[in-house]
Structure formats: structure tokens, C-alpha cells
Image (cartoon, helix red, strand yellow):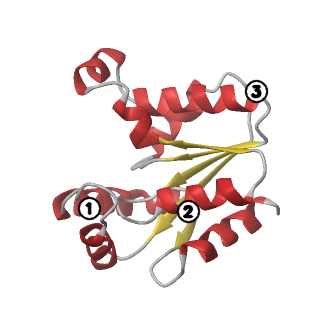
């Protein structure tokens, strides 16, 4: 199974993905941001639209082929089109679960500003990401609120939802 862990900048995707990988035996975790760093902007222009999503799908399948029981791919999917890039790059039909983490904009701005472990992405990027996802939110899978929940509780809710 592949879990696409989606959400705007600062919502907690990386933290929740790591918790899921730690608590679900045999789970590989892929950071879309890290994968994107392999191809600078010029290379992405040559590779075409959705290159990070497409590469993520190929890598996820590779982990599954090597024996992982599931893969969590955490990244921002701002629209169903971006989910389509991922899905279309899969060579086999695989169970795919799209989970979008969500929180109010003011919460995201505060979280992003208080991050000490990563570079500040800036309020404009947080706002842009949040607004883009808000336009398509009903089409972006299961929505899990993170504003008042600890990351461990969010990961548990997702994990419990995967087993049903």
C-alpha cells in the first residue's frame, strides 16, 4: 500500500510521516522535498510537469518491490492533477491512500515561524500552499485536522484508518 501524506507547508507532514514509518513495521518513508532536491529547477523543466510526483511513484514501487509492506510519500499535492501525476506513474495497480493534513492558516504561519530544525519557508509560501489546497480540499482524500492534535494522535488516527 502507498500512503500519500499531503498538506500545506507547516502542517506536520514530515513529523507525522516519520511517526507512521516508526510505528508501522516494514514502512518506507519518502520525503518529496528531499526527492525534489535531486533535480534542480533547470532539470525539472527538462523532465516535464510533475517530475517529483512521478519520481516518487517509481521510488515507492521500488520499495514495495523490495519487500516494504507500505510506503509513505509526504509532499504537497495542491490539486487532483498532481495526485494524477503520481498515480499515472505507477506501473501496477497499488492500493493508494490519500490523506490530507489540515490546519487553519494562522496555525500554519505560527508553526512555520517557530521551526528551528529547518529553514524558514516564509509566510508567503505557507499562505500560497494553504490557499491552493483550500480550493481543492474536498477532492484531496481523507482530511485530518492537526491544529489541536499532537502529531502522535494524528499518526494514530491515520494508522487506524489504514487498517479499516
**Residue 18: % across, % down:** 58, 56
Label annotation for residue 126: 1
Residue 109 visible in the current orientation: yes
Could you tell me how far apart the alpha carbons at marks 2 and 1 are, in whole angstroms?
18 Å
Label annotation for residue 16: 2
Q: Is residue 36 above or below residue 119?
A: above
- What element does badge 2 sit on? helix
Q: Are marks 3 and 2 in contact (CB under 8 Å)?
A: no
Could you tell me how far apart the alpha carbons at marks 3 and 2 are, in whole angstroms?
24 Å
Quadrant assignment for the N terminus: top right
**Residue 104: % across, % down:** 36, 77
Discs 2/1, front: 2
Could you tell me how far apart the alpha carbons at marks 3 and 1 are, in whole angstroms?
36 Å
Specify the farthest residue to the top: 46
Give residue 153's quadrant in the image. Answer: bottom right
Quadrant assignment for the C terminus: bottom right
Q: Residue at x 59, y 34 (%)?
A: 87
Ranked by sequence position, the earlier of labels 3 and 2 is 2
Discs 3/1, front: 3
Ranked by sequence position, the earlier of labels 3 and 1 is 3
Q: Are marks 3 and 1 in contact (CB under 8 Å)?
A: no
Write down the residue under mark 3: 66
**Residue 56: % across, % down:** 53, 32
Ranked by sequence position, the earlier of labels 2 and 1 is 2
Q: Residue at x 38, y 33 (%)?
A: 36
Q: Is residue 64 above or below residue 91?
A: below
**Residue 2: % across, % down:** 67, 43
Front position in the image: 81 or 106: 106
Amino acid at each position: 500500500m502507498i500512503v500519500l501524506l499531503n498538506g500545506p507547508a507547516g502542517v506536520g507532514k514530515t513529523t507525522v510521516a516519520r511517526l507512521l514509518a516508526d510505528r508501522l513495521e516494514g514502512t518506507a518513508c519518502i520525503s518529496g522535498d528531499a526527492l525534489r532536491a535531486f533535480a534542480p529547477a533547470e532539470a525539472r523543466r527538462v523532465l516535464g510537469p510533475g517530475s517529483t510526483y512521478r519520481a516518487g511513484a517509481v521510488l515507492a514501487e521500488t520499495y514495495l518491490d523490495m519487500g516494504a509492506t507500505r510506503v509513505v510519500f509526504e509532499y504537497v499535492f495542491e490539486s487532483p492533477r498532481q495526485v494524477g501525476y503520481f498515480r499515472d506513474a505507477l506501473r501496477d495497480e497499488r492500493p493508494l491512500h490519500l490523506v490530507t493534513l489540515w490546519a487553519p492558516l494562522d496555525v500554519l504561519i505560527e508553526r512555520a515561524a517557530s521551526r528551528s530544525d529547518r529553514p524558514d519557508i516564509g509566510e508567503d509560501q505557507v499562505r500560497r500552499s494553504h490557499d491552493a489546497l483550500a480550493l481543492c480540499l474536498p477532492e484531496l482524500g481523507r482530511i485530518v485536522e492537526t491544529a489541536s492534535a499532537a502529531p502522535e494522535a494524528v499518526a494514530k488516527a491515520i494508522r487506524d484508518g489504514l487498517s479499516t
